[in-house]
Amino acid sequence: MKRALVLTFALTLVFGLMAVGQVKSLNWNLGTEPPSLDPNIATDTTSIQVIQALFLGLTDFDDNTMAVVPELATSWENSEDGLTWTFNLRDDVVWTRTGRKVTAHDVVYSVKRTLDPATGSSYAYVLWIIEGAQAFNNEEGGTAEGVGVRAVDDYTVEFTLIQPAGYFPSIAGLWVCRPLPRFIVDEYGDDWTKPENIATNGAYELGVWVHDSHLVLYKSPTFYNADNVNIDQVFCYMIEEASTAMLMYEAGALDSTAPPLEDMDRVKTDPVLSQELTMAPDLCTYYYGFNNEKEPFDDPLVRKAFASAIDRQSLIDFILKGGQSPAQTFTCPGIFGHVDGVAEGIGYPYDIEAAQGYLAEAGYPNGEGFPEVTLMHNTSEGHSKIAQFIAQSFMDTLNVTVNIVNQEWKVYLETCRTDCPQIYRMGWCADYPDANNWVNEVFHSASGSNYANYTSPDYDALVEQAARATDPAARLDLYRQAETLLCDVDAAIAPIYFYTIVNLTKPYVVRTFAPLGGEHWDQWDILPH
Amino acid sequence: MLSSHVVSGGRNKTRKSRSLWKDGLRRLSRNGAAIIGGCIVFALVILAVGAGWIAPYHYTDGRVIDNYLHPNGEHLMGCDFMGRDLMSRLIYGTRVSLSAAVVGAFTSFFIGVSYGLISGFAGGKVDNAMMRFVDIMYGFPTLILIILLMVFFKSTFSNIEPGTFRGALSALDARMGGMFFIFVGIGITSWLGMARLVRGMTLSVREKEYIEATRAIGAPKLRILFRHVFPNVLGPAIVAQALAIPGFILYEAFLSFIGLGVNPPMPSWGMMLSEGYVAMRSHPHLVLFPAIAISLTLFAFNFLGDGVRDAFDPKQVG
Amino acid sequence: MITFLIRRILWVIPVILLVSICTFMLMHAIPGGPFDAEKALPQAIIDNLNAKYHLDDPLWKQYLDYMWGFVRFDLGPSIAYRARSVNDILSDQWPVTALLGSVSFAIAIIGGVALGTISAFRQNTIIDYSSMFISMLGLSIPNMALGPLLLWIFALNLRWFPPATWGTPAHVVLPAITLGTAFMASFARITRASILQVIREDYIQTARAKGVRESLVLLKHCLRNALIPVVTIAGPSFAAIMTGSMIVERIFAIPGIGKYYVTSVGNRDYPVVMAMTLIFALAVVVMNLLVDVSYGFLDPRIRYN
């Protein structure tokens, strides 16, 4: 009943304003139907975008500095030994539908629900830094009560960790920890995210969800900062075809879109579109990995030869056209622990002579006797184009034969896991701004994502030590050593480029770009147009 | 041989005796559209076989600086995203598209004709059961079946380990740029219509008197099947399958569109179309030329096929 | 007639059985499961999820459970889309695809029969050749090229129609044209060929000799009989429309079920794949039934008893 009242109020407001011509409505393209709006379960960027508009997190990331900033939590401190973190919450945040206050108990409920194996959360592993989390989540004998998170009082949450982690505040803001309305989830179960059931606490509330078609978010009148939220409604389309989205943008039906790379030349030279174009760094790295245990890539010289045969700049200039940066190390810029390989000479720049030299040293002068190798990628136009370019590069530089094979995504993952191809394509995007998420969680010998089968005890020791250390300078040095091993000495992988966000936005939208997580629509504005 | 040409001075000319073939060919030669279609098909075959000599560039030659060049003096149809000459890729692509169409058509022809012959000739319960199976398979969405099959093939046969049968097939497939399993997939999913058609024809031929006569003499069944039934069925079956070839070309284009087509850098028209349509607004040449190629081929096969069917249709009066 | 109908309806059972078993086996033969992701899940979670969706039951049991649900119209949950059941997906989006398909079908039949009739009655003239050419054009230009082209011209430049998505009758026009023109050619050619054949038949000559009006000859005698082959290919055309809708729905951002044919296999969303396949099979059976029943009306020589 209360929900109906609130919604009526919101709609009256919207229509009232529309009558006056003052409704600020943003036309956005989500790109696809979000698989789930449940914060504990979501894994993909589409769902996370909507979730972050609906639900507040303890912390958030500043769009410009990427520093951790307060959101639901006003402040936090950690104990002397670094094992206990205490967060103090706001007391003026309420759940829609009921007006009930959001409390520390809701945070605890959410964390435990994420870790509950029955929920089946794919991202629960980021919370394993919490005491008792892994035991509970991985069914190794732990219980919900044993998880190191508790509500000290209604507005204070305390986390106990298994080891000090300077980056913990950024983890606390991730979508998997966002407080949930227990009373709703208990009542409706899997159906709790339906628009007629859901309760949220963020800047927007979920008004309409027509699957595979669109969803509409309305500004929440009960949001504590509602006065400063300019955009009254966000109309989210789900257009999968990039060229159709581009057409709609040009027709004025969308306010923002990512132009297909085929249109990049036209966009850059068009007087109107070129003014609306932004190319900003994104926190992802694109790389080709080598199966370090499969011939002939078990020989580091062969790996070095191939890594040196990739013309990254031409790839960026002529194929990608998005102002990307060439990558010689793994962790991307903007993440703590990033090492600038190009500037510091770590990794292998494009060098034809060096490449041929390495191959000759490995016993295959001018490619003689080198077996045919397979380059695999998951089915996609974009990956196919990049693969064709790089494979041609390999063939021209090293005089070898490279067969390109593509597999459908799930089959591809299975193949990489069980019988990784000689050269495989992968990408990695930041979950939180620390190199631990990169060099440790991906390439530690025990990691499930280490398809390259890179096993180096020295490397493992370095990244483990860096995870435990607290002094930033010391950590940075450890990460530098780790990247040197990974991308230079052992050349286990060949990083290729750091992603950029390539975006067209209408001039009447005053916006920010969020490198991590979802866009902050509540901070944007729409000028009269 | 009794010849009946009598040269006569004026009105009474006796017709030469003609065989069915000559009759049909004569009728075909009067069908303008069919002739044009035939010429185009012939030209395509020449292009496919002689691509290496005819195409100005190899299909992997290109400087990436030339990416997306619009048609100009050096590249009559422009360049693709890697600076490779589009016209050359179209010419090489003829190989893939035509062979996918022909081999796919042949595979489904082989399966369909065998199935239909056996079913029609055996008759009775066997025929009933076999045709019921066909009816059921008609209810299978080909789209899902082909996707499942292709995913299955690509996952099972991607490891080139020498020595095993599986490894050998994988190597063969890789050598052919992924075409082998496309042929298999197309063949497996398209034989139903042919089976029905052939079975119907077999049934009607079976009833003809000369078959009865042959049986009466005591000729073995198989002999009847091969010697008498099969040749009568073959003609119309071939014509029917030829008419289906345009469909196979579109089929390959569709598979490429959803990512289950040939492996790059081998060009196929379908793949060029699916790479190109996204760029329609900025670089229309990328979609225009492959679309024209596909359309022209479809037109040619359709008119030729129609012409052949009309010409050899025994019901039509000459 | 009734026994005929009943026999045909009973026919559904073996179709459903065979199609479902084939799909089920193939789906489980391809590697990868619904929970494979780039960031590998801990084994305990995978086990839990498998248990939740009964994916750890022996295959025969999973199959039987599914079919048991199917006959009770419970098509199971979607594994990829956790908040939706397959029933939800179908009830939301099947009508969209059905509408698009029907309008396309109508365009194809009406356009095709019209062009074919014109061609037949003006055989071997310029009108004949142009009509056939126009219909062939529709067949030859692939959906994925025609769709964006129509959007570009009519939505972006001329602004006659909305740019993609769904919701009003205006949204239906461009996608239906894209989808329908591909089949217009088949209908046109069949109509033309069959009218040409029927025209030569004796009873037409007789009717003309009796002095029956030409238009009556056309409508009552020619067209009706000529429609039989048209109706015959209506069945397979329907299947092709379902396939084609996948591309068109993607290009025009239409919330139909077309995309699920492809994405559900990719997601290993077993219940959705099974449902898509079985619904399609059922639809084909119904179509064939309608076709056979309509024979009875079109050709008085065919009667079922």
Image (cartoon, rainbow, N blue to C red):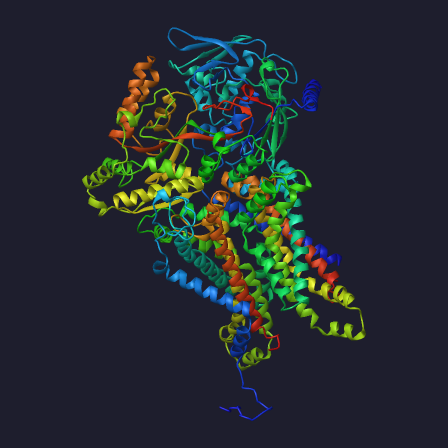
Of residues A26 and B193, the one drawn nearer to the viewer in this rendering: A26
From this viewpoint, is residue C107 visible?
yes
Residue C189 screen position, x and y as percent: 62, 62
Q: Is residue A351 left or right of residue B228?
A: left
**Which image quarter: residue B51?**
bottom left
- In the image, residue A411 sits, relative to residue A16, either above or below, namely below
- In the image, residue A187 sits, relative to residue C225, either above or below, namely above
Of residues B300 and A297, the one drawn nearer to the viewer in this rendering: B300
Q: Is residue B52 left or right of residue A122?
A: left
From this viewpoint, is residue A44 visible?
no
Residue at (44% x, 10% y) in the render: A85
Report how many numbered discs are placed on residues in the image.
Answer: 0
Of residues A229 and A164, the one drawn nearer to the viewer in this rendering: A229
Q: Considering the image in quadrants, where does the N terminus of chain C appear?
A: bottom right
- In the image, residue A162 sits, relative to residue B51, either above or below, namely above
Q: Is residue C301 left or right of residue B45?
A: right
Q: Considering the image in quadrants, where does the C terminus of chain C appear?
A: bottom right
Residue A203 screen position, x and y as percent: 58, 18
- In the image, residue A403 sits, relative to residue A53, either above or below, namely below
Residue A333 screen position, x and y as percent: 37, 24
Of residues A17 and A159, the one drawn nearer to the viewer in this rendering: A17
Residue C218 screen position, x and y as percent: 74, 66
